[in-house]
Image (tube, grey):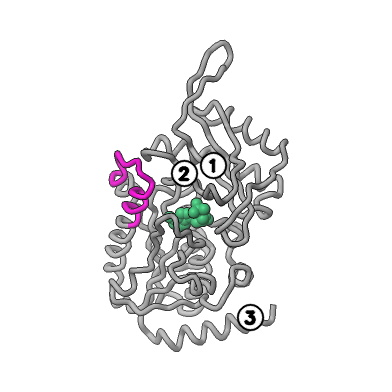
Amino acid sequence: QWKMQAFIDNTIADIRAKVGNKRVICGLSGGVDSSVCAALLVKAIGAQVACIYVDNGLMREGETELVKHTFRDWFKADLHAVDAGELFLSALAGVTDPQEKRKIIGKVFIDVFKQEAKSIPDAHFLAQGTLYPDVIESGGSVDGPAATIKLHHNVGGLPAELGFELIEPLRDLFKDEVRRLGIELGLPEDVVWRHPFPGPGLAVRCLGEVSEPKLATLRKADTIFLEELRKAGWYRKTSQAFAVLLPVQSVGVMGDGRTYENTICLRCVQTDDFMTADWSRLPEDLLARVATAIINRVKGINRVVYDISSKPPATIEWE
Ligand code: XMP
C-alpha cells in the first residue's frame, strides 16, 4: 500500500517534470493497461492530457459506455471518443481471411487515430501503457500479450510516424502491479480485472465475413456467457472467456417446428503468459445454464458448444 502510494507520487512528479506545459495524447483502448496509464496521466496533469478512444464498432456490449462513463464523468478527462464503427464495417465488407481482417482493422485504426490526433493542437507526447513484459518481449501488444502467429496492430508505430515523443509510465510494472495501481487510482473493479481483449475485437470472433447482424448476435451471446461467469464467481478464476459465432448451421427443433440456425462456441482458458493455455474446467451446471440462456434468448442460435482444445496446437482465439 505504502509502496504503491510512493510509486504514484514519484511517477506523477516524473511525468510533470518531463511534460512541462506541453500536451499529451493518450491512446485508450478500454483495456487494463491503457486505462491505468490514462488514469495516472489525468491525476498528474489533468486537462493537459487528451485521451483518444476509437470505437471501432467491434467492442463488446457496454464497453464503450464504460470507457466514456469512467473517463468523462468520473475522472473528468478530456476524452475524444471517435465513433468509427461504420468506417470499420464498410472496410471489412466482403473480407473473410483472418489476417486480411486484422490488416484492415489495423490500417483503419491508424487512420482514424491520426485524424483525431490532428484535432489536438500542440500535442507533443504520446502516452502508452506498455508494461515490463511487453518491453522484454519487444513487439508485444499494448493491451495484451503478444502472439507471434497472428498479426497484431496497436499504436506501436504511431509515435515515430506522427513525430511524438513517447511516455511509458508503466514500463517497470508487471500486470498484478498495474491492477493494484488501478485500484489505488480509483478505477472501477470491472476495468481493473478485465480479461485481455484483442485489438481487432469481435471481428476475429465472428468467423468469416463480419456484419452488423452477426455482431449483434455474438454480442448478446457473449454478454450472457460473461454474466453467468461473473455470477458464479468464475470470471476472475479464468484468464480469458468469450463467445465465438461459428458460420455453421445445424438442425434443431423448437415446439413443433424444425430450425436451421447458427452455432455459438464458448471459449474459456487458463494461462500465465498466453503463449500456452489450457481450457477451463468450468462446472457442468454453469455451462448448462449458459447454453440454455443463449439458446432461449439469442435469436438465430439453436446450438452451443464448448471448446476443449488447449494451446498449442489450437490458439486461444479462433481466427
Ligand atoms: P492467440 O489466439 O494467438 O491469442 O492464442 C493470444 C492472446 O493474444 C490475443 N490476441 C490479440 N491481441 N491483437 C491483440 O491486441 C490481435 O490481433 C490479437 N490476436 C490475439 C488473444 O485475445 C489472447 O489474449
Residue 250, position in %: x, y?
A: 50, 23
* Above/below status of 292 relative to 88: above
Amino acid type indicated by mark 2: Arg
Identify the residue at the far bottom of this view.
17
Q: Quadrant of residue 266?
A: top right
Numbered tag placed on residue 205 in the rendering: 2
CB of mark 1 near ligand 1 (< 8 Å)? no
Q: Nearer the viewer, mark 1 or mark 3?
A: 1
Which residue is under mark 1?
243
Q: Earlier in the sequence, mark 1 or mark 3?
A: 3
Residue 317, position in %: x, y? 50, 48
Read off the magenta span. 90-106
> Which residue is at a point 44% across and 50% down the rendered structure image?
201
Q: Are marks 2 and 1 in contact (CB under 8 Å)?
A: yes
Q: Is residue 299 left or right of residue 58?
A: right
Work out how far the residue at label 2 is from the one at label 3, CA to CA, in angstroms.
39 Å
How far apart are labels 1 and 3 at the CA level? 38 Å
Q: Which residue is mark 3?
A: 5
Q: Quadrant of residue 54?
A: bottom left
Mark whose residue sits in front, 2 or 3: 2
Q: Nearer the viewer, residue 103 or 48?
A: 103
Decide: few, some or many residues near mark 1? Use Cα within 10 Å; few <14, some 14-19, many ≥20.
Answer: many
Q: SS for tag 2?
A: helix
